[in-house]
Image (cartoon, coloured by chain):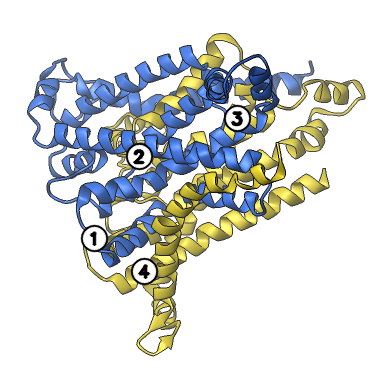
Amino acid sequence: MSGARLDRMIWLALPAVAYLAVVYALPLLWLLGRSVTGPDGFTIAQFTAFFADPFSWRVMGNTLRIAFWVTLLSLVIGYPVAIAMARARGLMQVMLLVAMILPLSIGVVVKAFAWQIVLRRDGVISQGLVASGIWAEPQRLLFTEAGLIVGATNVFLPFMILPIYSVVKLIDPRLTEAGATLGASPFYRFRKILLPLTLPGIVSGSAFVFSMAVSMFVIPSLLIGDRFQTLATLTGRSYLLMRNEALGSTTAVILLVIAVSIVVLSTWLSKRVGRSL
Amino acid sequence: MTGIERMTSALVWAMAVIAIIFLLTPLVVTVAVSFGSSAVFTLPPPGWSLRWYERVWTTRGLWASLLTSVQIAGLATAISLVLGTLCAIALVRGRFAGRDAIATFLVSPLMVPGLVVGIAMLQGFKLVGLREAWPSLLVAHVVITMPYVVRTVLASLSLFDFTLIDAARTLGCSYGQALRKVMAPALAPAFLTSGMFAFLASMDNYPVSIFFTDAWTKTLPLQMLQLVEERPDPTIAAISTGLIVLAIVVLIIGDRLVGLRRLADF
């Protein structure tokens, strides 16, 4: 094919790019621009006002703390599961794939609703812990931070497992065997072979889960309630209930900045990881 | 195998079993509650009944919201498939600058919090005077579904050998026939997987839709959230069980057509 013909290819890309530019990029830029303009032009007054309020810091703390625990818990559960998924055959493999994909298809409202039932004082977890003697009496996990972390981890876990699984399944199993033949201890083999090779998956899985946990909105409102505010619930409330667009656009921009930082940081990390191999 | 290896191996499998149970917990709970006779979600239920399923038929607004969601998700996915595939072809075959940047841009709505996208669009649509719920939802949902299509079709196209089209033409196919008989079958799994995930993402979307619904036009997640907040009874569980059954059917079809393993290719 000739060069001129290939260059005309750009017209095929145009509809999608133009659509997203008009419907998505322009409004985002407008939102950003408005958050730093006052009656007299450029100002960061909205942000200084926001950060001067101790309540805002509590909200930021809540958001980042919950996202951190959800990411850590997902990684601790998800890493071995991703390895199991790459090694599993037959029924186990099908079960793992179904457990991964089926929950993605039922919707977050339904899942949060189900966790409301599980986390109640008379729910399955409470009953189980009392029966096993760990708890002396039934306790309510619903409307606690622990309950929120468990529920959110449940919803986001597949997004940790799938990226790690996608790198684990590419690893040649003979690598660890070779390490073993050459006398490397299991821990040494994990640290020097498996861990470095799976780091890109860990980085992208953690970035996914962390950014989703930072911006989750319906899960906190159903599992912990309005007394506990995160950046996302505060943003939603200020638009939908309080009609306080100034506050809402400020927190929305902070959310956006956090999300973009996660993307930039994780891209930088996976490049570094790639180079150190 | 040494002792430590056997232990780690056992740990990995134990973790896998725990994860399966953990991931399926909300589904099992939902199904169990939906068939229970009690209105207060006791588990295990004191008796079994189908009365919540009868309620589903008479719950006001539910079927309308399901219809809205299916229409929006179907149309948005179709538009994204067309625009996204055209763009993916251009990105793979074109030789113009900035192709990586375009790909990143089209996938970026996945990484921006839905709530932020929703607020930005709400203000943007207001500026141009778009106020009706239904068209706003459709316009917004194309942005939600586009990344899934671009990501998967792009990955699949970059593996496609375009000389096959020339080969088909040498063998006597017209250009259109070559596209239809050679390229379309090679891309079919990508269309199916990305279409499925795009459709589900749209059906399940909450943080963007919430800004564009009104009293008459609601999507299913918003209608269900309203039910959970206003009248929490097992009717919601019955609806959800219906959705789970639907998802299982889709999964079986997906498995038959492209294989479960491919669906997990992230």
Q: Residue at x 67, y 54 (%)?
A: B97
Screen quadrant of the N terminus of chain A: top right
The residue at which mark 4 appears reads as A249
The amino acid type, in three-letter code, at marker 4 is Ser
Residue A57, position as x, y percentages in the image:
43, 70
Q: Residues within 10 Å of mark 2 (few under 14, many from 20)?
A: many
Residue A219, position as x, y percentages in the image:
34, 46
The residue at which mark 1 appears reads as A240
The residue at which mark 3 appears reads as B156
Nearer the observer: mark 3 or 4; the answer is: 3
Q: Are marks 2 and 3 on the same chain?
A: yes
Query: Between marks 2 and 3, how big is the CA–CA gap?
Result: 21 Å
Q: Which residue occupies the foreground of this view, B37 or B182?
A: B182
Residue B154, position as x, y percentages in the image:
58, 36
The amino acid type, in three-letter code, at marker 3 is Ser
Q: Which residue occupies the foreground of this view, B34 or B72?
A: B72
Query: Between marks 4 and 2, how big is the CA–CA gap?
Result: 27 Å
Q: Does residue B37 appear left or right of residue A199 in this picture?
A: left
Q: Are marks 1 and 3 in contact (CB under 8 Å)?
A: no
The residue at which mark 2 appears reads as B76
- Label the blue chain with its letter: B
The amino acid type, in three-letter code, at marker 2 is Ala
Secondary structure of residue under mark 1: helix
